[in-house]
Amino acid sequence: MLFEDIRTSKTSFAKDPCVIRLGTRYYLYYTAHDGETDLYGIGIAASDDLTHYEILGTLKSELPGEGRGICAPAAIVLNGTVHLFYQSYGQFPKDYICHATSTDGVNFTRDPSNPVFKPTGAWNCGRAIDADVVAFGDKLLLYWATRDPEMERQMLGVAAAPLESDFSAGCWTQLNPDASILRPELPWEQLCIEAPAACVHDGKIYMFYGGAYNCCPQQIGCAVSEDGVRFTRLFDEPMIRNGGPGSWNESESGHPYIFEDDGAYRLFYQGSDDHGKTWRLSRAEIAFDGNGLPYVVQ
């Protein structure tokens, strides 16, 4: 799979993938860019096989609080309804997480309480981007990226809402009020951990993430948690690296999204071969060994 969107530009712009299954079809949501208006939106594509996609349109910003666009989607299907979480763009550091719902995967209704989440605590700048959600027990966990008060270091946090709630603004409780749950510490992560991508396997939450800012290069690591808050890295080196010279992901393999479907795990991610002028999406098959360590199926 190598997905690209060249509708409004000579080069592809498709970033920040997210995939769900609704009925018999798969839906890919991603950050799209309109080269004419310089605004960001959420591209929507559909597939029957997770390899070939038909672009159906773009969900565009509508509200003043959504800034210069909306992007970095995450989605989950609960009781036949698609819950889409996304960030506002261009209001740094006042970009927050918003919520919308759909029954057909294409037409969405905004949550009137948007933004539904913004972080608190002296350890962060109050910004929340790069949403990801996963059902865990009787809660929906919302993972997000933020920065330190100096706006230099990117790191992760988590909030929770009752699974039976409507996920509006009053439903969320921040579970890490005093410190990040994962921050850059390894040399290859440089100053950034972002794009949390969580799945549940064998009763634990596995968190794939992007380490380093875009095209520095960003690469993909993984950590694990038994409670969804306290994480331990599984590897000291990237699990998925950027590609070699001439490859589609020479400048980056980043912003992962883990999708489980009938027991099969697929990691979608973005790549660039020209330092961020062009963005495409691909995927890797993920499996777990007898010790619970994830690996890429070759």
Image: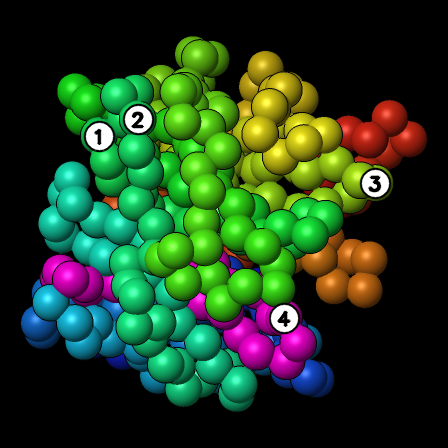
Mark in front: 2 vs 4 = 2
Q: Residue at x 35, y 71 (%)?
A: 111
Q: Position of residue 208 (x, y in %)?
A: 57, 37
Mark linked to residue 121:
2
Q: Quadrant of the N terminus?
A: bottom right
When asked about the image quadrant of residue 123, the answer is top left
Front disc: 2 or 1: 2
Separation of residues labelled 3 and 2 (CA atoms): 32 Å
Upstream in the sequence, badge 4 or badge 1? 4
Label 3 close to label 1 by CB (< 8 Å): no
Which residue is label 3 attached to?
Answer: 202
Res 119 → quadrant? top left
Residue at image mark 1:
125
Residue bearing the label numbered 4: 78
Give the residue displayed 68% in from the left and 84% down from the top: 23
- Marks 4 and 1 close (CB-CB < 8 Å): no
Residue 102's disc is none
Amino acid type shown at disc 2: Gly
> What is the secondary structure assignment of the residue under circle 1?
loop
